Image: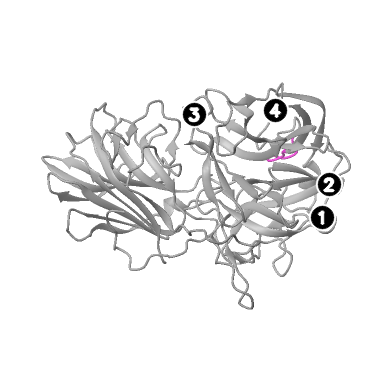
Amino acid sequence: MKTTFQYFLHLLVIAAGLASPVSAKGEEAPSATNPILPGFNPDPSICRVGEDYYIANSSFEYFPGVPIYHSRDLINWKMIGHALNTKEQLDLTGVPPSAGIFAPTLRFHNGVFYMITCMTGSPVRKGNFFVTATNPSGPWSLPHWIEGARGIDPSLFFDDDGTAYMCANCRPKDPVHEKHRNIWIRKINLETCQLEGPEGILDSAEYFSSDKIGSAKNFESPHQYKKDGVYYLLIAHGGTSKNHAVSIWRSKNPLGPWEGNPANPILTHRGDHPAGITCTGHADLVQAKDGKWWMVLLGVRSENAQSPMERETFLTPVDWSGPWPVVNPGPHQGRVDLVFTPPAIEQGKPIPTGFKTDFDETMLAQEWSIIRTPSTQWWDLKGKPGWLTIQLRPEQLSENTQPSFLGIRVTQPNCVAETRVDFQPADEQGCAGLAILRSSTSCFMLVVEKKGAGRMVSVYQGGELRASEPVSAKGPVDLAIALKNDQLAFSMKQGADSWKVLLSNLDASALSTDPGGKFRGSMVGIYASSRGKESQEKASFDYFNYSAQQP
């Protein structure tokens, strides 16, 4: 870190989602804080291999696709790579917002990791496929496409004899409701990538005419398990907003017929719920090293389903000592708590409070994400050592294209990002600086540009200029964007000057729209564009820092 932004008075020393250390004997029991994966990390799927836990999440139109996280204690997580990190694995060209990679499932069998997922909205190829690896950090194989696999949210299950089953959702031929979706299950030959044998169905039709599980809309995100000789099918339903829920069925046969849990839904935050969390659903179960069960799920840190982080990964205990799993037994049964008692936490781990880079490395940190798959490498860490250099290209954030933007996940509703940019614009088309966005229709930029004969620092909301301030003709400029709940502040400085606020209290509610309408959380990062004009210009960035802030 080569400079420190002082716009706010206090830094948050512990980011939400990280646990306190295990206390000594006789002291207060340790606690952990949800979410365990803060920021844009929806649709979690988890598996355990020996002492290690792994989670995969949806990535939609962002590249690389499907982040993989690792933990030894279910609380402290570290990104170790992505399952889809080459154009041959993931071509997102032309994919619209909130399409792309949906709902991965991560499983391990006979020394091999399997990640199965669905490509949506692509003009190149759509459908369900899986990739494999012997090391979850990669490399992963090229996609194995599964012909005839309908619907979205695919999952794999391995029976005791090694037989593999695939399940996903689908629209029935004769729907009883616009949101009528069924879950189908078939054997799959993972060598030939072919579905085989008869198909089992969990039909949601009957639940549209009863109140057994509440909202029966959109049966999705199925996961299959086997416990004590009984097969279980866990699904989400009700849509991804405030009616989201999780229910479970069981059978003596992997294809059904299925008996519903009388207590369904076993998880939902509809109606009365612990403060601070809503939209809970899309879950997966894992048995810990000590034999206890846990559930990972998505949720939104909000009372009204509006959050700049959108859907994040949460953790809650499960009692599966009886025939049915009970989520978070106790006063908040079937709900998720922000603070909970964790499993035993590993000692001696540093607690990250943000993201910092001086660009001294030779490769981009794996925390960075790009909007859609790049066709060329427009970033460079070697040409100007200690700096990141970005090519200005015609594409812009306000378009559904592949702009020169490197972003990280916004992990808190109160945070600040800062950078130092060295850019001498040749004309009024070029710009370079910082950006924070939820989508192409909700983006904010703080950029160095040229206006007339002078160099300016300007604030844009989409294509609308909101503020502008002249700076000296030469030399790097430090820029900072601060998010405080639903408001943004934009600041700048040069050299030893003090920070100057260009614009504050700008309405940022566009970053917190209903997750039922948009599936991705906000990103903040580095941006450069020649705004519709071909250009050979480049901008260089000395550092990038992201920190959580106190409210």
**Residue 86 tag number:** 3
Marks 4/2: CA–CA distance:
23 Å
The residue pinned by badge 1 equals 324
The residue pinned by badge 4 equals 149
Marks 1/2: CA–CA distance:
9 Å
**Residue 250 tag number:** 2
Marks 4/3: CA–CA distance:
24 Å
Residue that protrudes farthest toward the left in the picture:
453
- The local secondary structure at tag 1 comes to loop
Q: Are marks 4 and 1 in contact (CB under 8 Å)?
A: no
Locate the N terminus and report the quarter of the image it occupies. Answer: bottom left
Q: Are marks 1 and 2 in contact (CB under 8 Å)?
A: yes
Image x and y of residue 544, in percent = 33, 49
- The local secondary structure at tag 3 comes to loop
Q: Judge whether 151 appears above or below 192 on screen.
A: below
Q: Which of the two residues, 131 or 534, is positioned nearer the viewer here?
A: 131
User: Residue flagged by tag 3: what amino acid is it?
Assistant: Thr
Q: Between tags 4 and 3, which lies in front?
A: 3
- The local secondary structure at tag 2 comes to strand
Q: Between tags 2 and 3, which lies in front?
A: 3
